[in-house]
Amino acid sequence: METPAETPGAGVVLLTRPGCHLCEDARVVVRRVTGDLGLGWREVSAAEHPTLGARFAEELPVLFIDGVQRDFWSIDEARLRRLLTTP
């Protein structure tokens, strides 16, 4: 069983690392889409969660929705909108 620090958790979660330009771009997309849809999201730093950082080191940034990895590197805005609005 994984501890909470080893799982991204529920909702929209963006796993990032400091100084990552792709993470900056992803943050903008996630902020825009969730804001348009009236949803919350949170950012988790790989620097503060070394288990997640090690597990996804080559894929950062990583987008999770309800604990499931949905995208990485470049977060596609249209895909994210679809994922968050399709039942």
Image (spheres, helix red, strand yellow):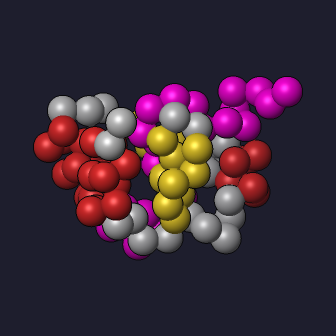
Q: Is 67 positioned to the left or the right of 28 in the image?
A: right
Place residue 48 in its image quadrant: top right
Q: Which portion, as a residue range, is magenta?
A: 1-26
Give the residue displayed 32% in from the left and 43% down from the top. Answer: 86
Residue 18's spot in the image, x, y percent? 50, 59
Position of 83 relative to 54 (above/below): above
Report the quarter where the C terminus lies. top left
Question: Closer to the camera, 52 or 10?
Answer: 10
Q: Is residue 80 magenta?
A: no
**Residue in the foreground of this view, choosing between 70 and 85:** 85
Decide if residue 45 is in sight here: no
Residue at 48%, 41% (x, y): give it. 65
Q: Position of residue 1 (x, y in %)?
A: 85, 27
When asked about the image quadrant of residue 85, the answer is top left
Horizontal and vertical percent for residue 23? 43, 63
Q: Which residue lies at the image location 67% right of the left edge and 36% below the top edge?
A: 7
Looking at the rendering, which quadrant does residue 54 occupy? bottom right
Q: Residue furthest front?
A: 87
